[in-house]
Amino acid sequence: MNADHSDSEPLLKSQREPLLQLSDLTVDFDTPTGWVRCLYGVDMEVYPGEILGLVGESGSGKSVTCMAVMQLLGPRALIRGNVRYRKQDLLGFDEKGLTQMRGREIAMIFQDPMSSLNPVHTIGRQVIESITYNTDTPVLNPTDTIGDQVEGVVEEQLGLTGQAAREEARRLLARVGIPDPKQRLREYPHQMSGGMSQRAMIAMALAGRPRLLIADEPTTALDVTIQAQILELIRSLRKELRMSIILITHDLAVVAETCDKMAVMYCGRITEKGSVKSIFADPHHPYTRGLLASLPRIDRRTDKLHPMKGSVPAPHEMPQGCAFEPRCPVALEECKLNQPSLAIGPDGHSIACFNPQRGGLQQ
Amino acid sequence: MNTQVGASHVSRQKGNGMPLLKATALMKYYKIRRGGWLAQKKVDLKAVDGVSFSINKGETLGIVGESGCGKSTIARLVLNIDTPTSGSVVFKGRQISGLPPGEWRKLRRQMQYVFQDPLGALDPRMNVFDQVVEPLLIHNIAGVSERRDKAAEILQAMDLKDHTFDRYPFDLSGGERQRVVLARALVLDPELLVCDEPVSALDVSIQAQVINLLAELTKRMGLTMIFISHDLSIVRHVCERVAVMYLGKIVELARGELLFDSPAHPYTRALLSAIPIPEPGLKRKRTLLKGDPPSPVDLPPGCRFHTRCHMARQVCKERIPELKPSKEGRWVACHVAHGKA
């Protein structure tokens, strides 16, 4: 599995080029009440082998950004801008090209594993389906020929290729830490726990040996002890397969423990991005600072949380200037009128703010 | 802060001998069907299995644990929404199950419930103001104008602006909805508030607003609160005493500071170490739990946690550990911890 990628990407910092680069990505939705803009020119890049955390509150555009990359937004969405993946423009792809790209180059896992898996098919059938679609294993139509429960039928009808796909499925399930994979292949999603289903989803995503994995809130529906297991798995996969990962989450603590880089989104724009270390040590954007200050921590007792005032504006009542201005404690006159653009600051992280703050937060 | 909480806690216990609420050996088994349609049999799902605790007036008790451990079932039993299979709940000296309806209604007014999903808890066809007036109508409290004053007062105390009063739930943000739910619970001036994951559906910045509001109100109104959550960071912030549950049993019950700073039960320790901390590069000792919790239908013999416990001994597989007090004033159900104490 490693062999595929290792030749193409030397991990030297100086000559690295982004694997995925979004520039000025704008998404509008055609709604019954008119066009609604969800993304306002997002610039973002993912380098080979790194985990990028995409953080923001609900409605900030994290998921829309990634769905736009995969072009899963449907016919009512108008996507503009530039999405470059390994020097190719993904937005120019036709349906056939997209099918080739999805799963084999970029794979995605979603928040709720239970609703992503098909309840009437076995795990085995779904993992094998993913393998046969996303690799060049010459198999007949997998949905017609793979029997669900009886292994014998599979072997009879598909011969060795079916056997190979089944073997690969078993290997993948074992890789993502599912105990007794042979038995699990024959089980249905309802027989598995949430954590196990999410592992199965990850196995399916790995089937096409993608270079980039987009994980959209992969642990939000899971318990903390299971979340810790899944995050551990994601970290180890990155190391082993040298995959790049975009981790969408609303949990800053998860970002701190898992990611290398992070981008904070607010109302369809990136407000701050840079390395996780430098942003947590010295957040510049008042929104990032507000988010960090409002977090209760497990390792110490705080007397009072410091919440931000107000709430996220609705898409149709966006302020004219900076979207955060109505909630911002340090807003200037200029913030009401103009939209700050994303610019690189002195310590390497980019920020979109007219009045950036300095210094760590006391906690 | 540390000593303050401890001191007030002790003085309350001394000053008032009788707890506000006392649950004794609570059990709730749900009958579920197992097997195919030919070989069908009914088995017990042991949602809550022998849980005892008490809360003094003005105290905040946190109940934490993973999904399926019985947290919400306890809330339902405490509020008499479900009747326990056995055991009793005594509120202000009266056993709540089996009360005649009229008596129960009077008592019910003093215990209110806040659910996780505010949109599901609110009536979509009623405006905010009417929703808050409704409990007063139901319990026939005060006259028409007084009701309106009361509702307006509590809504303002929730930081809700006048112009939201005639809006409908779909028109509000998540934080505003949860405030309306809180207003509706508090307008009756209850003594006990049971919050079941009150902020789990909210974004972090809104979470902090609601938590601060809740903390301030409980202090001001002298509310007693049972706070159920899977988010231990929030529980640490809100609660004075915390009970950790695993598969229908309390495994550890202690003052917040003690529990979070020096957990005694291996499950509490694992749970705490699984929670991410927003500080990159922080080195922590981690005990990653293996596997999933067993199903509450086929419980393992002995200690329920022994299948995932790295400290399990032979005795853990055979005997169920009792919840016993230790010297530091914590209660813990673990053979290994008992051996050390």
Image: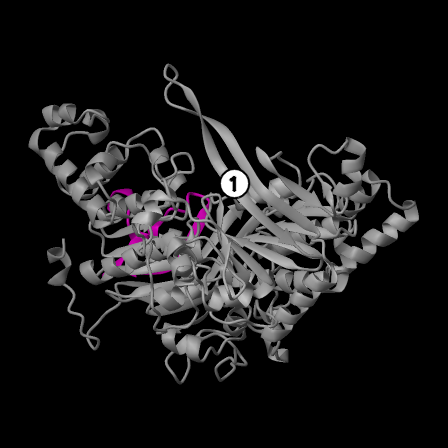
Displayed quadrant of residue B60: bottom right
| Colour scheme in use | one colour
Q: Which residues are magenta?
A: A70-97
On the picture, is B207 further left or further right than B260? right
- The image position of residue A220, as x and y in percent, is 43, 52
Would residue B298 be counted in the magenta stretch? no
Please report the residue visible at 64 percent of the width from the left and 65 percent of the height from the top. B212
Please report the residue visible at 59 percent of the width from the left and 50 percent of the height from the top. B53
Q: Nearer the viewer, residue A117 or B208?
A: B208
Would residue A77 be counted in the magenta stretch? yes
Report if residue A23 is visible in the image: no
Q: Nearer the viewer, residue B102 or A45?
A: B102
Residue A242's place in the image compared with B189, above or below, is below
Q: Which residue is mark 1?
A: B48
Q: Nearer the viewer, residue B122 or A87?
A: B122
Furthest-top residue in this view: B38
The quarter in which the C terminus of chain B is drawn is bottom left
| Marked residue chain, label 1 | B
- The image position of residue B329, as x and y in percent, is 54, 63
Furthest-left residue in this view: A160
- The image position of residue B186, as x and y in percent, is 75, 52
